[in-house]
Amino acid sequence: MSKRKHEEQELPFVALMDTMTNVVGVLIIVLVMVGISIAGAVKKILSDLPPVTPEEYQKMLEIVKQQPPPPADPKKLEEEKKLAEQKLKKAIEDLKTIDVTAVESQMKFMDLETFRKKLEDARKLRTAQKAEVDKLIAEVERLKALLDQTPVFKPDPPTYVRLPNPRPFPENPNETRVLVAKQGVLFLNEKEFIKPVIDGLDKIRSQFEYKEVKIDPFAKMLESIFGNAKAAQAAWPELAPLVNTFQLDQVALAQKALITGGLPATKQALTSVGNIALVTRSTMPIVAEAIVGATKGDLTKWTALDPSRDPTVPIIKAASAGGKINFSWGANLVSVKNTPKDILDYFTKDLGGLPAIKKLSADKVIYDAFKLVAILERAAASPMMNSSSYTFKPSVRPGAALVQLALTPKAGGGETREQIMAQGSTFQRLMRQIKADEKGVAVFQVMTDAFPTYLDARKIADDIGVAATWEFLPKLDVTANVTGFEVQKFAVTATAPRPNGTTPAVRITAPKRSLD
């Protein structure tokens, strides 16, 4: 009985083992089937793949190498995540410890009522500013209206501007004066205008010489020199014979210097003084004072009149020795006694008698200005002047050695600013005539308010190629001198004595004229 029971107890275990064996067998069969199936699939895949050459394989390797590296290791990422969580936790803890009391106090201070008050203030300010802005807008509108009524500005036409081009002035130029006024221009070729007048005067030149000279025109001048009318009348007999040769103011001053120095002032002495003044390029009074100085033992005034342009080679020499004075004029040597008479004789006879000096006054003529004026007044009224663009009136000017003609343009003698611009204008024809003359020069004399007119005229002249220059003209005073006929000045010409022992002063000449 007990053995049977024991067998009954072992039966389930055996059955379990059998079942397990069956299950394992089934699993083995399944695995085998799966393996067969996988092998078949692999075989199918491999059979479907195309064959790979070594070159293609190498190319695939290079492509694989170029691929980006794989992402980070998951473990490393997990560690970084944990570290970030720790930092976040720490930041949260730090935020809990921040002091926000100041912000809370400000929030309590800036309550709603305060904001309302500020808003009201801002509204009032906006209202006030709006009133100001409205005023500004109204002013802008007013100015716009005025601007609409303002005429459009039209600038002046462009001004012709030229750069100066200095060039030498031609020798012996044939000058044509172009007088430029605000309204237009006037033309005057002084040589051409005065030439027929001079030609007419040359034919009767001898009629203008003094024949019977009277003291009347010279009385006032001589009184100023000698101090009174009686002294002037007493000196007149020695002066009158020289009226055709020398300026009488110079003769009178020389006569006074000789008489003051105790020397006789004869006609011969005064003539010699005049000739010496011409050759030494000095004045008669200075020469007379030098002669007086020599008679008193002072030779420096005489040697100071040396006309030599080379100081190392003087023309005048003078030295006293043994009661005599040795004078030399270039190669001419003369020794005279040291007495006033002998010294005066040297100047009047020896030096004054040299042919080269004596002839200086022989060829010199001074004409009667009033006779010249009378003839010129008749010429001005003659028909021969009808073709001229000017009428003239002669006059004698005290202090001037030439008779002057005051010119007055005739009607139509000039052209307006608009007329000179027209083709074929007289001005343009004149410019072409000047251009054709090798020595022709246009001298523009411009009044102070006429510069725009000058610019127009000068542009025309430059376009034609005229040699030209310009100068300011203070006033429209058109004058011309009657050259070649020296007349008496009827006035005293100031003469500054040369300091003792000095050479002639060096004169700085005025700048030479040039074309521009």
Image (cartoon, helix red, strand yellow):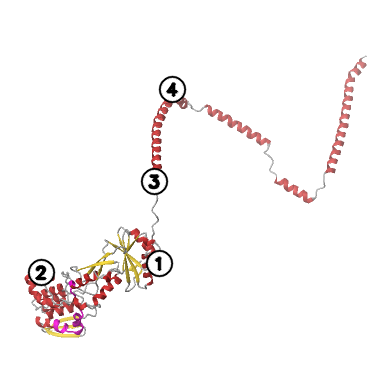
- Which region shows up in magenta? 346-370
Q: Which residue is drawn at 38% across and 72% down?
A: 436
Is 5 above or below relative to 132?
Answer: above
Q: Upstream in the sequence, badge 3 or badge 4?
A: 4
Asked if residue 95 shows in the view, the reply is yes
Q: Does the magenta stretch include residue 364?
A: yes
Q: Where is residue 204 in the image (x, y as percent from the top left)?
A: 22, 77
Q: Distance between the residues labelled 2 and 1?
A: 58 Å
Q: Decide: few, some or many residues near mark 2? Use Cα within 10 Å; few <14, some 14-19, many ≥20.
A: some
Q: How far apart are marks 4 and 1 (CA)?
A: 92 Å
120 displayed left or right of 211: right
Q: Where is residue 1 in the image (x, y as percent from the top left)?
A: 93, 14
At label 4, the amino acid type is Glu
Q: Upstream in the sequence, badge 2 or badge 1?
A: 2
Q: Disc 3 vs disc 4: Cβ atoms closer than 8 Å? A: no
Which residue lies under the disc numbered 4? 113
Q: Is mark 4 on a helix, strand or loop?
A: helix
Q: What element carries label 2?
A: helix
Which residue lies under the disc numbered 1? 464
Which residue lies under the disc numbered 2? 223
Which residue ends up furthest to the left in the rendered image? 230
Which residue lies under the disc numbered 3? 151
At label 2, the amino acid type is Glu
